[in-house]
Image (cartoon, rainbow, N blue to C red):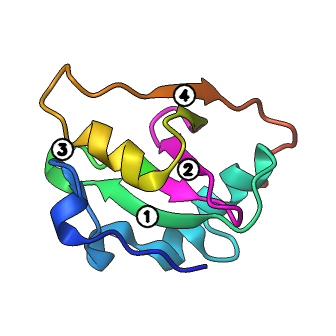
Amino acid sequence: MHISIPTNLVPDDWTTDPQEMRKDFYWGENGSGRLLAESVGITNPEGLMIKSRDAGGDGYVFQDSKGRIYLWSMIMDDVYQYTKPTGLNAILAEMNKSAGRGRVEMKLLPQISEIPE
């Protein structure tokens, strides 16, 4: 399932620019995003948008094959599942609100298997 986010819905400090997203690198067969997702029980992850380089480039929003949305904290190698709201458009709407106004709830997913080196 390939999803692309319309440019006008991408929040400030995030990007869907293919050069910054580097999907093959992060989500390819041995990509660090794919391996981390598998370690918390997520199959078939697909990258949706990444924090822009200018904003630190340290977060990646992705989804699984069932359309559930997650945030990969790239610095900590933690994966959070969005629990409220759960739909991509609703999450983006909250992220696009002015600072301090948007509200999302997430839960940290526990690692259930080792990440291959």
Of mark 1 and mark 2, the one earlier in the sequence is 1
Q: Find the distance from the CA under tag 4 to the CA under tag 2.
A: 10 Å
Q: Find the distance from the CA under tag 1 to the CA under tag 2.
A: 9 Å
Of mark 1 and mark 4, the one earlier in the sequence is 1
Q: Position of residue 114 (x, y in %)?
A: 84, 43
Instruction: List the residue tagged with mark 1.
Output: 48
Q: Are marks 1 and 3 in contact (CB under 8 Å)?
A: no
Q: Is residue 57 left or right of residue 46?
A: left
Instruction: List the residue tagged with mark 2.
Output: 69
As drawn, the residue found furthest toward the right would be: 113
Q: Give the residues in magenta.
A: 61-78
Question: In the structure shown, which secondary structural element does the residue marked by tag 2 occupy?
Answer: strand
Whether 93 is drawn above or below 111: the answer is below
Reply yes or no: does residue 69 show up in magenta.
yes
Q: Nearest to the eye among marks 1 and 2: give it.
A: 2
Q: Amino acid at mark 4?
A: Met
Q: Amino acid at mark 3?
A: Ala
Q: Is residue 106 left or right of residue 101?
A: right
Quadrant housing residue 89: bottom left
* Residue 46 visible at all: yes
Q: Find the distance from the CA under tag 3 to the CA under tag 2.
A: 21 Å
Image quarter (top left, top right, bottom left or bottom right) of the N terminus: bottom right
Of mark 3 and mark 2, the one earlier in the sequence is 3
Q: Rate crowding at label 4 as few (under 14), some (14 to 19) or many (20 or more) other CA atoms within 10 Å.
A: some
Tell me what residue is drawn at x 28 percent, y 77 percent.
Answer: 19
Question: In the structure shown, which secondary structural element does the residue marked by tag 3 occupy?
Answer: helix
Instruction: List the residue tagged with mark 3.
Output: 55
Tell me what residue is drawn at x 27 percent, y 28 percent.
Answer: 102
Question: In the structure shown, which secondary structural element does the residue marked by tag 4 occupy?
Answer: strand
Instruction: List the residue tagged with mark 4.
Output: 106
